[in-house]
Image (cartoon, helix red, strand yellow):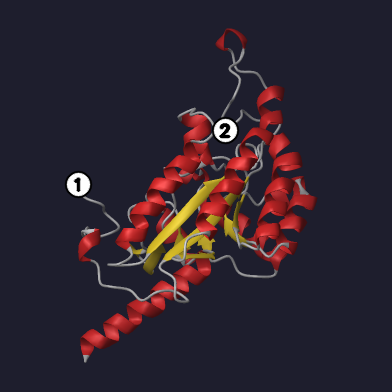
Amino acid sequence: MSNPRIPYRLASERPVLPPMQGKRILVHLVVNVEHWQFDQAMPRTIITPPHGKETIPDVPNFSWADYGMRAGLPRILKLFAERGVPASTSLNAGVIAAYPQAADAMLHAGWEFIGHGVHQRSLIQASGGEEGLVSEALELITRFTGQPVRGWLSPGLRESDDTPDILMRKGVDHVYDWVVDDLPSWIETRHGDLLAMPYNLEINDSIVYAIEKHATGEMLSRLRHTLRLFEREVEENPRVLAIGLHPHLIGVPHRLQELEDMIDLLQASDDVLFTTGSPIADWFVTATKAEASADSR
């Protein structure tokens, strides 16, 4: 069957959109900040257990993620502040209580907060039901930031058949799980249309370094090739370039220089605007309404 939520169309046949603030490559830096529970099995591992038998607590693999929260995240915060680039945090809401200084630092930095569950566990595994977990995550983040949560990225990008309907009902207006295009698309739900925002499964340190296990430098290489293509394609239509980051992966000493080089590469392009999810969503909605109004005349 075809995509049940997003009607198919060729990217080359999409209506032409205007630039955003005069720029046509919209770069969205998404830092996934997660709560891995010490008394639970780890979501991902860097060290396999002796004799293949999983242990709880899993000290080495928990420490892998915990290092990112202690040492990797401050490096990323400092780099983005020095370069003056905005960013988003895709946040497990459990981070607010487990790592309060980290949550405060991201709030102080002005990062946009994206809902990402409560802990780094699939929505489908929620003991209190998926809707209850979504509500809890949104409430915790809203209470902490004082702002409604507009965007959502499911842990592991895993959804149930009901997730888009639940998110729409809870007031979320855009989601990053449906990585189907380099521009936003509309997702059909029982409560109206939800916006599917571009995310990235290719220029994403979790995919590149934790799953595919490439040597340091692969993300920069992929970004360079992507940027070159996008700089040609934006003659036809803008592109959204989202980059997925994790403090325990890109924030380690031997990879931070790569992140610096990635920012340098993007800042050297005259086509690039660094922004976050909600402004991209607003830009797309405004442009889409303008297009619909023009078509009706």
Q: Which residue is tagged 1? A: 1
- Residue 286 picture location, percent across and down: 40, 79
Residue at 58% from the left image edge and 65% from the top image edge: 149
Q: Is residue 111 left or right of residue 175?
A: right
- Can residue 128 be seen in this snapshot? no
Amino acid at pointer 2: Pro
Q: CA distance from mark 2 to mark 1?
A: 30 Å
- Residue 210 picture location, percent across and down: 53, 31
Near-viewer residue (220 or 246) = 220
Residue at 57% from the left image edge and 47% from the top image edge: 261
Q: Quadrant of residue 41?
A: top right
Near-viewer residue (110 or 49) = 110
* Quarter the C terminus occupies: bottom left
Figure check: 56 above or below 137 = above
Kind of element beneath mark 2? loop
Figure check: 115 above or below 293 = above
Figure check: 44 above or below 83 = above
Amino acid at pointer 1: Met
Kind of element beneath mark 1? loop
Q: Quadrant of residue 252?
A: top right
Considering every residue shown, the one lying at the far right of the view is: 101
Crowdedness near tag 2: few (<14), some (14–19) or many (≥20) residues, C-alpha within 10 Å: some
- What number is the disc on residue 43? 2
Q: Is residue 64 left or right of residue 153?
A: right
First-in-chain label (2 vs 1): 1
- Residue 255 picture location, percent across and down: 61, 37
Crowdedness near tag 1: few (<14), some (14–19) or many (≥20) residues, C-alpha within 10 Å: few
Total marks in image:
2
